Image: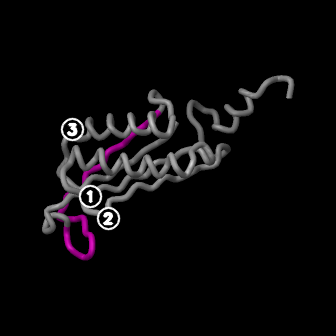
């Protein structure tokens, strides 16, 4: 049940948003083993004239960038999975968007299971309910 929010330094485009949403959903499911049907992605566009790296706008550098935050339940992914995810997200977005500034970021935020959930139940509640009755 991850939630992803991505900011892209380019003019708004429904087609790009759709491609990015599909890419991130697929990578999140395949690498982090999250449920495809519960992965939520929001896409936000920022004009490259208003995005600065090293004090210069991306428009002046003729580059694009992104900032992705993804929230997952604490302890559900290994360091290797997260490292592979960061690498594949960068590669996938670069293939979709063109040359990216090296300062394009992926932040995997781990949230305690008792601090979030969906459909009115926390992840901790779901875990406890799935335990065998003999415990």
Q: Position of 108 compared to 6: left or right?
A: right
Task: Indicate the quadrant where residue 127 lies.
Answer: top right
Alpha carbons under labels 3 and 2: distance apart: 24 Å
Figure check: 108 above or below 1: below
The reply to whether discs 3 and 2 touch (Cβ–Cβ < 8 Å) is no
Q: What element carries label 1?
A: loop
The residue under the point 36% across, 40% down is 24
Q: Position of 34 compared to 102: left or right?
A: right
Figure check: 15 above or below 82: above
The reply to whether discs 2 and 1 touch (Cβ–Cβ < 8 Å) is yes
Q: Position of 83 compared to 131: left or right?
A: left
Figure check: 35 above or below 90: above
Alpha carbons under labels 1 and 3: distance apart: 18 Å
Q: Residue 14 carries which label?
A: 3
Q: Where is residue 14 in the image (x, y as percent from the top left)?
A: 21, 38
Q: Position of 8 compared to 40: left or right?
A: left
Q: Which of marks 1 and 3 is nearer the N terminus?
A: 3
Q: What element carries label 3?
A: helix
Alpha carbons under labels 2 and 1: distance apart: 7 Å
Q: Does the magenta stretch include residue 46?
A: yes
Q: Position of residue 107 (x, y in %)?
A: 45, 56
Quarter of the rendering occupied by the C terminus: top right
Q: In the rendered structure, which segment of residues is drawn in magenta?
A: 39-57
Q: Residue 103 carries which label?
A: 2
Q: Position of residue 108 (x, y in %)?
A: 49, 52
Q: Which mark is residue 65?
A: 1
Mark in front: 1 vs 3: 1
Q: Earlier in the sequence, mark 3 or mark 2?
A: 3
Q: Which of marks 2 and 1 is nearer the N terminus?
A: 1
């Amino acid at each position: 049940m991850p939630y992803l929010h991505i900011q892209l330094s380019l003019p708004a485009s429904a087609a790009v948003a759709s491609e990015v949403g599909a890419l991130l959903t697929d990578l999140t499911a395949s690498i982090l083993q999250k449920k495809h049907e519960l992965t939520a992605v929001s896409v936000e566009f920022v004009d490259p004239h208003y995005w600065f790296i090293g004090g210069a706008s991306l428009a002046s550098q003729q580059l694009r960038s992104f900032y992705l935050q993804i929230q997952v339940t604490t302890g559900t992914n290994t360091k290797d999975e997260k490292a592979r995810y960061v690498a594949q997200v960068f590669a996938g977005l670069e293939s979709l968007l063109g040359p990216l500034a090296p300062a394009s970021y992926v932040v995997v935020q781990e949230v305690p299971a008792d601090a979030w959930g969906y459909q009115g139940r926390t992840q901790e509640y779901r875990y406890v309910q799935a335990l065998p009755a003999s415990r």
